[in-house]
Image (cartoon, helix red, strand yellow):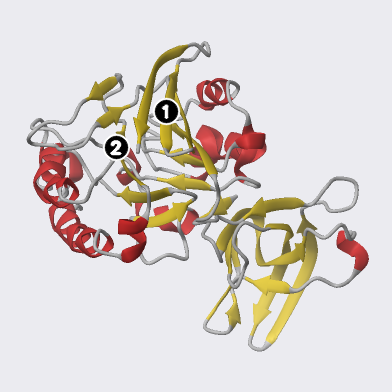
Amino acid sequence: YLQNMGETEVTIVWVADKTSIGWVELAPDDGTHFYGEERPKFFNSKNGIKTEATVHSVILKGLKPGTRYRYRVCSQEVLSHVSHKVTYGDIAATSVYQTKPLSFITNDSRKKNTSFLVVNDIHDNADMMEKLFSHCDFSSTDLVFFNGDMVSFFNSEEQVFSGFMDRASQLFASNIPMYYTRGNHETRGVLAYDFQKYFSPREDHIYYSFRQGDVYFVILDCGEDKPDTDIEYSGITVYDEYRTEQAEWLKEVLQTKEYKEAPFKVVVCHMPPADGWHGEREIMSKFVPLLNEASVDIMLSGHWHRYVNQKATDKVRFPVLVNKNDYILKANVESNTLSIQVVNLEGKEVEKIVIRK
């Protein structure tokens, strides 16, 4: 599956069932057969050594904006590694022979129209997620957001993949980039510390920003919803400090030329700002004052498991769209207009939000 797609780079992640080395073979979309010539290999490696693992991630750099590339991922089992001698086993790879190779298109800030989807609070219900996606046309979709709480606990790799990622990879995620906004439930469980092993694995943080077409996206990591001292966390969390650190990063991002020049600014954050629980109050006090001065067009949130279209107020000077867990947001940006269609599980439109420039 694709992570952190940009104009000139992308990270490709996959999971093998044996300890292995892994690599990506890359080819242009030029009509030649993938087997027409030897394709360059990019290995999962660190500090000059190929990584022996079951979870592999490779970042491809130096790509061209708005360009389609074909790729194959390969894993070769490591049977033993003693001293300087490594014994290898079989190779497993995605098919490029009887089926078309996997492919992706890099982001492009010059693109005339941009379309994206948002789901949230799936809580391991892959069937519900698939039904929501059944109302969408992936052939015209640029990117997909998972806006937090895709699982109830981040306890095991099997739970993550059976809960939503296996289905997502089958539906779109090997060809269309997926951007994951961590929710408060992904912070819970024995695998929570390893979140970045699977999502945004080659980035410095799991909060980040990027541009596609006329939209500059700012992805915020909300942290937990209760105080760090709450008995539920057993003294393992420091999210107040983490959100303060994130606010310093946000302050810099909002001052960049890239952000200021983008026609539309969309913030994605699992928990909305509110005067309710501790985490929501932290977002209100640490993120909102910065965003209020940054011409934000809309914030997309979840968390509440109910739909709220919150208009701009004196305290939060931009609209906040809180999506229900069994709704999907279908957004399109074209001709100086950002339109967001809110669609329920039966495929019926609940509301349509239109922002014009």
- The foreground one among 209 and 312 is 312
Q: Is residue 86 above or below residue 69?
A: below
| Label 2 sits on residue | 298
Q: Which mark is residue 99?
A: none
Residue at coordinates 73% horizontally, 65% vertically from top-left? 26
Residue at coordinates 66% horizontally, 52% vertically from top-left? 104
331 horizontally vs 323: left or right = right
Report the label total.
2
Residue at coordinates 60% horizontally, 45% vertically from top-left? 176
| Label 1 sits on residue | 340
Q: Amino acid at mark 2?
A: Ile
Q: Is residue 310 above or below residue 296?
A: above
Which quadrant of the figure has residue 273?
A: top left
Image quadrant containing the C terminus:
top left
Which quadrant of the figure has residue 181?
A: top left
Image coords of residue 150 (percent x, y):
42, 35
Image coords of residue 94 (percent x, y):
77, 53
Image coords of residue 173 (percent x, y):
60, 43
- The foreground one among 297 and 129 is 297
- Residue 244 appears anywhere in the view: yes
Q: Amino acid at mark 1?
A: Ile
Q: Secondary structure under badge 2?
A: strand
Image coords of residue 40 (percent x, y):
75, 74
Q: Residues within 10 Å of mark 2 (few under 14, many from 20)?
A: many
Q: Is residue 325 above or below residue 84?
A: above
Q: Mark 1–mark 2 contact, CB under 8 Å? A: yes
Marked residue nearer the N-terminal end (1 or 2): 2
Q: Secondary structure under badge 1?
A: strand
- Residue 206 appears anywhere in the view: no
Q: Residues within 10 Å of mark 1 (few under 14, many from 20)?
A: many
